[in-house]
Structure formats: structure tokens, C-alpha cells
Amino acid sequence: MADTFTAGYKIAVIIPAFNEEHNVREVLNKLRMWRQTDFHNRPIIVVNDGSTDATKASAKTQWSEVIDSQGSKKNAGKGTAFIAGVRHAVEKYKPDIILMLDADLVALNHENIDYMIKKLIGSKNDMVVAKSFEPNMRELDWRYSGQRAIRTAALRPLLNGNKRWITMLSHGYGLETALNQLIKKTQVLSKPLFAALDAHRKNSLERQHEEILFITEVADQRNRLVDIRKEQLKKAREARRQVNALPKKPLGFH
């Protein structure tokens, strides 16, 4: 039976996966008990992002489904996989909450999942982020954590095709960094709830460098749009000037 606090909420789990054949099945096995407490309201979706190993086969179970990130077999990135998963989940299940998890989690249990979801439901926030441990048991910077519970309503701009959202989320410099910027009402849980094997191999300096690149690229795109708009206004003013310079025809009386 579902926890009384989460009963009535439809929660879709999205797991982006690239070459995780040895890890994703273990994650799904641990999610099985969690889903069985409220099977029809807890769909689990693995988004295969162009894996070249047996990830897709490993992720096919009786309690989960697998979709491809794109029509091709190309690895498009975690952000693109997340977008595909969200769109699929909303179209098929209409969930109230999207639960994003990494495909290589260890120490995963349903109590921690329920705790994260309860924190979201019991607040006015749009996203709750659970911190993780790195393989060396150091606490991972929350800004790069892939364990997040998000209200579906907060993703409405993405579902409506907002170009800024799509560009930022599918950018190569980090899905998590984009979510941090796009969803303002966020709570970070103080206690780490999960541990991951390989998802966070980059050190903090590399992560910071990626974030700087990401922010710089977004700023450059915004500046390009501003320049285009300025050029459009300049042309419009010039066209108006030319029209005003045309000789005025006298009004005729009939």
C-alpha cells in the first residue's frame, strides 16, 4: 500500500541511461518494491540515450519501460534524454511529479525516495534536490546531483516548447545546471540520501569550468538575439524613414 502522504499522487520516474548495462538493472530491482506499493501511479521510464552496450535489454522488466532518447542511435546527452522522458511520461501517464534518478545509483531504497517526494509535496517548492555521495564517499555538490523530484507543472514551459528551456536543458554543459537556473523554487535536502558509482567522475574544478562555459554560452545566445532584434528595429526605422520621405500626394476633392 502506498504511503498515505503520497497516496493520490501520480509519480513518474525518469532514468536517463547511457552504457549502464551493469548498473541499471540493479537500480530497477531496488525500485520494484517502491512501485509495487502503488503500481499504477508509479511508472518507471528508462531513457536509453544511444547506448552501445546492452543497457536497453537490461532495462526491460515487467515493472519498467524503455524508450529511446531520439530516433537515431546517437548519444544525444542527458538533457535530451530527460526531455524525451518528460514528454513521454506526461503524454502517457499525466504525472503530478517527475522523479529523476541516475542509472548508476547504489544504496537506493524506497524510504529515501518517499522522503524526497514528501518534502516536495509538503512544501511550496517546485523542485527538491537530494544530495549524493561520490564513490570515495565525499559529499557531491548538490548543484550536480541527478536525484530530483520536480512538480510537472514547473516543467510547463518545456512541454509548451519554450525554446530557451529546450536549448538550456539539451545543452552539453549540464542538465542539472540548467534545472538549477530554470526552476527557482528549489529545496536542497541537507542529508545525502544516495550514492552513485560513475555518474560524477569529474572533479569540482571540471564541473565549475563546465558551468562557466554553460553560463557564457547562454549569455552569448541572449546577446545574439538582442543584436538580431536591434538590426530588425534598425531596418524598420529605415523603412519608415523612406516611406515618410516619399512626396505627399495632394488630397483631391470630388
Image: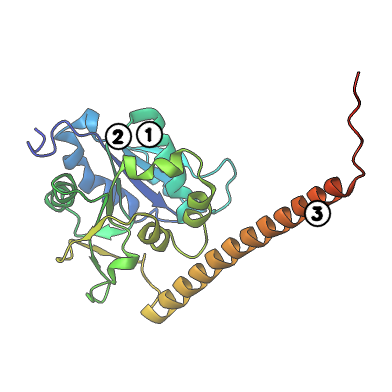
- What residue is shown with label 3? 238
Task: Say few, some or many: other residues with alpha carbon within 10 Å of mark 3 (under 14 / 14 to 19 / 20 or more).
Answer: few
Check disc 2 and report the residue beneath it. Answer: 95
Residue 200 pos. (x, y %): 36, 69
Where is residue 63 shown, x and y percent of the image?
28, 35
Q: Give the camera-side residue of 104 and 13.
A: 13
Residue at 63% x, 58% y is: 225
Q: In this orientation, which residue lies closer to the viewer: 61 or 78?
A: 78
Q: Which residue is mark 1?
A: 90
Q: In the image shown, does 158 or 102 lie closer to the viewer?
A: 158
Q: Are marks 2 and 1 in contact (CB under 8 Å)?
A: yes
Q: Give me the disc on residue 69.
A: none
How many labels sit on residues?
A: 3
Tell me which amino acid carries mark 2.
Pro
Going from N to C along the chain, the mark reached first, 2 or 1, is: 1
Tell me which numbered mark, 1 or 3, is placed earlier along the sequence. 1
Asked which secondary structure carries label 2, the reply is loop
Q: Quadrant of residue 158?
A: top left
Single out the residue that lies furthest toward the front.
253
Kindly report the distance in space between the C-alpha atoms of the residues bearing marks 2 and 3.
51 Å
Single out the mark in the foreground, 2 or 3: 3
Disc 1 to disc 3, how far (Cα)?
47 Å
Residue type, numbered disc 1: Val
Image coordinates of residue 29 in percent, x first then y, are: 24, 46
Disc 3 residue type? Glu
Circle 2: is it few (<14), some (14-19), or many (20+) Cα within 10 Å?
many
**Above or below: residue 134 compared with residue 175:** below
